[in-house]
Image: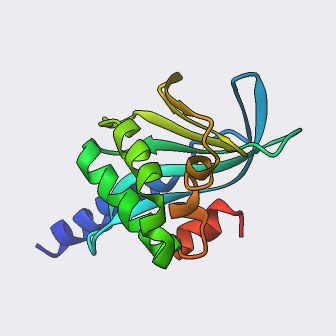
Amino acid sequence: MKYIIIFIFFLISITRNHATETSFPSTIKVLNKTYKLIGSGLLEYSIFKIDVYKIAFYKALKSDCSLLKIIYEMDIEKKLSNEGWEEGLKKNLKKEYDLYKKELKWIKEKTPNLKEKDQLIILRKDTMGLFIVNKKIIAKTKEKNISKLLHLPWLGPNPIDEDLKKSLLGQ
């Protein structure tokens, strides 16, 4: 029995190490722009540390564009993602949250259901924002108020996970 328990912990350890391995290149090209990796991390859920997605933060080499690249470790329904948007934006916007109802509506409408291994890119630059799923643009906006919200849940002053924010910023 003792050896079975040790073996189970060994298997869990191997699985955890595999899940946290970086799968992000140091540079990527998106829409004819080259982006440099700043940092990456893993979002986990609950006390059981269920892997939800791997995420990386990139900045363009020759402009002020930035993007988050997310690789899903499990299926995530649109409803759950939208709850995450609400929570992340409420934490960061606080009293101003109600001023962004129109912008949040757009984000929630454009957020897709995602499957394990899907790749979502959330790209932002000034007044432009894009959602790209598996290399296909699924949503585009030129609304500055939407664009400024797109990275806020992960990189804002009150992120969904402080350690994840530090990892994304390469700290």
Q: Position of residue 13 (x, y in %)?
A: 37, 63
Residue positioned 28% across, 70% down in the render: 46
Q: Is residue 110 left or right of residue 145?
A: left
Q: Position of residue 64 (x, y in %)?
A: 81, 46
Compare residues 141 and 77 and report the one nearer the observer: 141
Q: Image quarter for residue 8? A: bottom left
Side of 63 where 153 appears, left or right: left
Q: Name the quadrant of the C terminus.
A: bottom right
Q: Residue furthest right?
A: 62
Question: Residue placed farthest to the left in the image?
Answer: 1
Q: Position of residue 99 (x, y in %)?
A: 47, 64
Q: In this orientation, which residue lies closer to the viewer: 30 or 64?
A: 64
Q: How is the image coloured?
A: rainbow
Q: Residue at x 78, y 28 (%)?
A: 33
Q: Quadrant of residue 107?
A: top left
Residue 43 higher or lower than 91, as above or below: above
* Residue 76 visible in the picture: no
Viewer-side residue, 23 vs 59: 59
Q: Quadrant of residue 36?
A: top right
Identify the residue at horizontal 25%, vertical 43% (top origin): 77
Judge by depth and name the residue closer to the eye, 160 or 166. 160
**Residue 4 visible, this angle:** yes
In this rendering, the answer to whether 10 lies above or below 80 is below
Quadrant containing the N terminus in the rendered view: bottom left
Left or right relative to 28: residue 44 = left
Q: Residue 70, position in %: x, y?
A: 50, 44
| Figure disc tally | 0
